[in-house]
Image (cartoon, coloured by chain):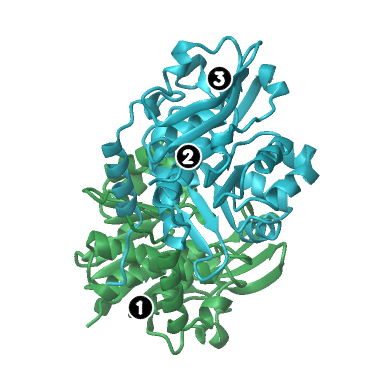
Chain colours: A cyan, B green
Amino acid sequence: MMNPILAVGSVAFDSVRNPFGEAVHVLGGSATYFSVAASFFTDVRLVAVVGEDFGERELSVFAGRPIDLAGLQSVPGETFRWKGEYGFDLNTRETIYTKLNVFEQFQPAIPAGYRSSPFVFLGNIHPRLQLEVLDQVNPPRLVAADTMNYWIQRTPDELRAVLARVDVLIINDAEARELSGEANLVKAARAIRRMGPRTVVIKRGEHGVLMTRPGEGEFFAAPAMPLEQVFDPTGAGDTFAGGFVGSLAASGETTDAAMARAIIYGSTLASFSVEDFGLDRLLRLTEDEIRDRFRHFKRLTYFDEG
Amino acid sequence: MMNPILAVGSVAFDSVRNPFGEAVHVLGGSATYFSVAASFFTDVRLVAVVGEDFGERELSVFAGRPIDLAGLQSVPGETFRWKGEYGFDLNTRETIYTKLNVFEQFQPAIPAGYRSSPFVFLGNIHPRLQLEVLDQVNPPRLVAADTMNYWIQRTPDELRAVLARVDVLIINDAEARELSGEANLVKAARAIRRMGPRTVVIKRGEHGVLMTRPGEGEFFAAPAMPLEQVFDPTGAGDTFAGGFVGSLAASGETTDAAMARAIIYGSTLASFSVEDFGLDRLLRLTEDEIRDRFRHFKRLTYFDEG
């Protein structure tokens, strides 16, 4: 039997403008991207909060996928909203607004049936909430967490308490440098590992992913899939996390080999996600396409000694 | 028998300042880095020019290596000099001065015994000189060339004439974008291939290398070796080219597999080069170290389907 994943994070309405067009009020949020991506691999138990404006149309996105919504709280008020605008090369992003709305009062309540979930993903939310989740669950086999510069700067002590209790931290390169105070990524990764996480996964956007953990295979590096057109990077990081944790949970292994494979599955899902606006590409993605692109990654990186 | 490489480029005295220290008047230049790196793999025939200030101490760098100096012209005047200063993270470099000196009148004269060299490397020099080299040699099995933004901007027609006659162009990502007018690297690489080179190798510094060529294995991507300390990136690109072309010449093959392996050997040599100032690390490098780091690259990138 496959291992289900408990995923806690945000569900949101996003508005995005970039050089290729505009998407207004589309379903987004860290837990949404994560759950849809992970659901290609295993069962997902989604814990998040939405407002009264979250209806059948939004729920239909999760329908037909192994995503359990018993932990999706619906409360009076509006759902979390975010609007961002990308620069011409998609490498810069400006937040136009962030309206927390119902998310401001979010208290993650883990349903009794979720408390023994073997794999747990803590999306990018207040570290205090991440701790509250960990306090409600029986020790999982693996806890993976995301965070961001906002929490690194504003809530360093609570973030440190989270780091002491997670197995895998998934962050981007700028965040790794800021969290560690080290400009060099190797030094940064080692410093973060000393804060708790045995494995640190550093996302480098168009430059791929660097994973580090103790031992002989201390580093694993994957390039990003070369793409002729990137439409919308929104959610790519959470999609990566969904493919990564999803692959680990499906295999039930956390060996170096399983972790490396999971990095490639995460990169595979993320490479699809950016091909269209919002969730659109993920929602029409097939298992065959995932398998083909995984093999494409193999061709992309394979060499032998000759 | 291994295939010798004809290498044409600059030999220079470099002065470099960076956050870790300063090197004054040390041996450098594209042909120097290339030749020392390639000499770990096969015989190199060096064609360049030096001045009267180039003496026994400088020549000793090539001694004991399979580098033939019959094409190294010594003429009255001073050797090419370059001084550069790196920013705190080594990602920015400012040229303090470039004194062409004897290089200003350089006319590459290919000795008769070099004219049937099966592998040819054209270092980053005026495209007109690159063409003069090609006019003097019998059709080689493989011609690899480097160039830079200066020639892309100032001598576009002569550069186009070179591109029509080379098999492999080795440039960095900013140059690829400038040469092609395409911001996206996939589009840039395809556009450059339409100018002539069947294979385009794009160097991305700390983000590794992307190679593209026609066919099923259109893309091959290699990360850079994660290093805790990078001392001096000077010459890393030419060192990469030396390992790359050296590996191809040694194997005598230009298949997708041989090209991928050559990218890793180039990356291996470059990863050593940056560990110390100037040529210092390459000059004390051993074949065992090269073999170990090649295998390290394998561990760094290997994954399977499970």
Chain ID at mark 3: A
Find residue A186 and report its horizontal and vertical position in percent: 61, 60
Label 3 to label 2: alpha-carbon separation? 19 Å
Instruction: Name the residue at 47% across, 39% down.
Output: A242
C-alpha separation, residue under disc 2 versus residue under disc 1: 44 Å
- Which residue bears the numbered disc 2? A242
- Kind of residue sitting beneath label 2: Gly
Tag 1: amino acid = Phe
Label 3 and label 1 in one chain: no
State whether residue B166 appears in this view: yes
Q: Quadrant of residue A103?
A: top right
Q: In the figure, B193 relative to B120: above or below?
A: above
Secondary structure found at label 3:
strand
Lateral position of residue B54 relative to residue A266, left or right: right
Callout in the foreground (3, 2): 2
Q: Residue A223: tell me if it is visible.
A: no
Q: Is residue A302 above or below residue A265?
A: below
In the picture of the structure, the residue carrying the numbered disc 1 is B41
Q: Along the line of sight, which residue is nearer the eye, B160 or B88?
A: B88
Q: Are marks 3 and 1 in contact (CB under 8 Å)?
A: no
Badge 1: chain ID: B
Mark 2 neighbour class, 10 Å CA radius: few under 14, some 14 to 19, many 20 or more: many
Name the residue rendered at 46%, 47% in the picture: B173
Q: Earlier in the sequence, mark 3 or mark 2?
A: 3
Say which residue appears at 41% left-offset and 35% top-offset.
A39
Choose mark 2 or mark 1, whichever is in front.
2
* Drawn side of residue A290 relative to residue B1, left or right: right
